[in-house]
Amino acid sequence: MTYQDQMRKGTTAVILLHLLAELGRPVHGYEVIKELQRRSEGGFDFKEGLVYPRLHELERQGYLRSYWQESGEGRRRKYYEITDQGRQRLAEERREWRAFRSSVDALLGLDEAA
Amino acid sequence: MAAGLACEIDALLERLRAQMDLDGEREAELLEELRVHLEEAVAEGLAGGLDEAAALAQAARRFGAEAQVGRALQGAHAGWGTADAVMAAAVPVVCALALRWLVYAPDGTALGWPQLLSRPSFWLVAVVALLVPLLKLPRWRYALAAWVIFWGLTVLFGSAAALRW
């Protein structure tokens, strides 16, 4: 597993929560993926199929809720939206990320350069 | 969507399904969600000027290896796995044991329905047993099956209380 893979694995949940919080409306999985690709401008390279297990985990943990809706042509789509619990988790993750980043920046001497 | 493309997507989803061991209802929902994703990805490729084969190949490449995605989905949904199944089976068994204790006195004599129904503890056990399916265990079918067996035994014990099993 590359360094980028490890970083991505550790941050996918908080990124998904942030995305859904910022969109502020229910979105389906494909839209989530397209929005991630658009915002990262290709820098956040990931296999699209692996986003679904993360969405499902977040849902099981109560951070997201979902519902099915007819989308025409007899198809249904599953939509996700963030819960209050998810927003709390996001706030905690953001705080932890800031603290972690500051520590690593200090260790690498990057805080002075910034 | 062309029939050929639909078949290819079916085949991809079938390979993915082979990596999972979830209950049928959950698997069907997962595959439905992923099918919509793949169809949309293929449609995007076609709209971008790719032919069917290239659009499908692109969608599959971006989607990721079926084995990897299937294992990740299994991991996301299996929950406690064995612990779930044990708990699903254990709760009704505990109820059955409690009922057995209620029905049979230490000297081996059994209560009939009239005496049993007058005991608050019997109703407590009955209500707990009724709540078992509400545990929403991923493997809830085990719980439901155990619950049905438990009530079958209850009726048997109650209607033939003189039996010593």
Image (cartoon, coloured by chain):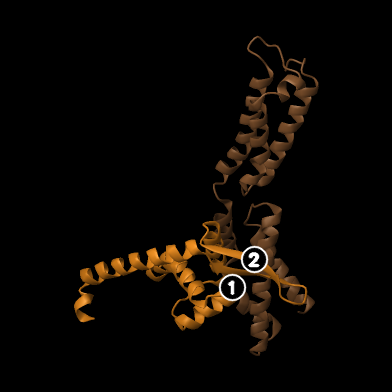
Q: Position of residue B86 (x, y in %)?
A: 59, 38
Q: Toward which corner of the image does residue B85 lie, by quadrant?
A: top right
- Colour assignment, chain B: brown
Taking A51 as reference, is B47 above or below it? below
Which chain: orange? A
Considering every residue shown, the one lying at the far top of the view is B107
Position of the N terminus of chain B by quadrant: bottom right
Instruction: Classify 10 Å Cα crowding around label 2: few (below 14), some (14-19), many (20 and above).
Output: few
Q: Position of residue B43 (x, y in %)?
A: 68, 82
Q: Position of residue B64 (x, y in %)?
A: 56, 70
Q: Dot 2 lies on which element?
A: strand
Which sits in the foreground, B7 or A9? A9
Q: What whole-number distance in Å separates the C-alpha atoms at marks 2 and 1?
A: 9 Å
Residue visible at 26% across and 70% down in the picture: A102
Q: Is residue B15 visible?
A: no
Identify residue for label 2: A67
Residue visible at 66% across and 28% down in the picture: B96
Q: Which chain's residue wears label 1?
A: A
Badge 1 amino acid: Pro
Q: Toward which corner of the image does residue A52 lie, by quadrant?
A: bottom right
For the image, the number of numbered tags is 2
Circles 2 and 1, Cβ within 8 Å, touching? The answer is yes
Residue visible at 66% across and 36% down in the picture: B127
Q: Toward which corner of the image does residue B71 lie, by quadrant?
A: bottom right
Considering every residue shown, the one lying at the far bottom of the view is B49
Q: Dot 1 lies on which element?
A: loop
Q: Position of residue B67 (x, y in %)?
A: 59, 61
Which sits in the foreground, B158 or A57? B158
Q: Seen in the image, is B61 located left or right of residue A70? A: left
Identify residue for label 1: A26
Taking A45 as reference, is B102 above or below it? above
Instruction: Classify 10 Å Cα crowding around label 1: few (below 14), some (14-19), many (20 and above).
Output: some
